[in-house]
């Protein structure tokens, strides 16, 4: 038994996806932070899948598919969202992003040692992102990129 067409297509897909995710990750200047539990869950799931791959009797084709599946799961660690030079990338496969000149309002919530950012475009709220950079650096970054009519609201969480 050889390797079938589906396995070859899956291999090509995984390689192209990794190249794309790495290129998007390199274009992001300020990365948003992820939850540590999310990272832990992905690593444990991948390790279990790899352990299953090598502990169970499988053909070469099935073993390659299992390894590629573990790589697909690990690709979630490479996905990044954050602030690029000319746009906000709000998801791993968001190749267009939200251009800074299209943003009407930015809301920043200071909570503990992180900044939670929400932006509004045409009255719709974008997904929230969390950053650990200093507020001054983030404001300097936005002052160079947002249009003149965009407003920035800064809220401070006083409970913590």
Image: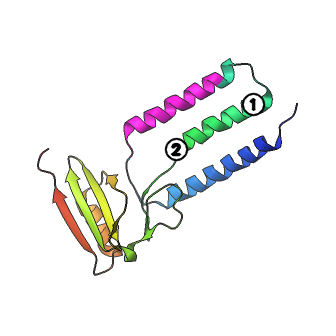
Percent x, y for residue 104? 31, 74
Closest to the observer, 90 or 82: 90
The residue identified by callout 2 is: 76
- Residue at which label 1 appears: 62
Residue 4 position within the rendered picture, expressed as x and y whole percent measured from the top left: 83, 39
Residue 51 part of the magenta segment = yes
Q: Residue at x 30, y 54 (%)?
A: 133
Q: Is residue 38 above or below residue 119?
A: above
Identify the residue at image location x=29%, y=62%: 138
Where does the image place residue 113, in percent across and percent down from the top left? 23, 47
- Where disc 1 sits, the SS reads helix
Foreground residue, 29 or 70? Answer: 70
Dominant SS in magenta: helix
Of residues 148 and 123, the one nearer the viewer is 123
The label nearer to you, 1 versus 2, is 1
Left or right: residue 149 versus residue 58 is left
Q: Position of residue 131 (x, y in %)?
A: 32, 53
Q: Earlier in the sequence, mark 1 or mark 2?
A: 1
Question: Which element type, helix, strand or loop, lies under badge 2?
Answer: helix
Using the image as rendered, state which of residue 30 and residue 109 is in the foreground.
Answer: 109
Label 1: how many Cα within 10 Å (few below 14, some 14–19, many 20+): some
Asked whether residue 4 is drawn in magenta, I would say no
Looking at the image, residue 151 sits to the left or right of residue 39; the answer is left
Identity of the residue drawn at 63% across and 23% down: 52
């Amino acid at each position: 038994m050889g390797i079938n067409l589906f396995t070859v297509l899956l291999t090509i897909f995984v390689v192209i996806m990794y190249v794309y995710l790495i290129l998007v990750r390199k274009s992001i200047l300020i990365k948003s932070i992820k939850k540590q539990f999310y990272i832990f869950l992905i690593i444990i799931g991948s390790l279990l899948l790899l352990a299953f791959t090598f502990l169970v009797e499988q053909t070469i084709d099935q073993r390659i598919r299992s390894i590629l599946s573990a790589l697909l799961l690990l690709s979630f660690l490479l996905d990044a969202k954050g602030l690029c030079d000319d746009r906000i990338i709000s998801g791993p496969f968001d190749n267009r992003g939200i251009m800074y000149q299209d943003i009407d309002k930015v809301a920043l919530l200071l909570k503990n040692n992180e900044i939670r950012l929400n932006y509004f475009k045409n009255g719709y709220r974008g997904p929230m992102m969390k950053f650990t950079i200093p507020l001054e650096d983030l404001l300097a970054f936005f002052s160079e990129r947002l249009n003149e009519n965009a407003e920035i609201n800064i809220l401070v969480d006083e409970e913590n």
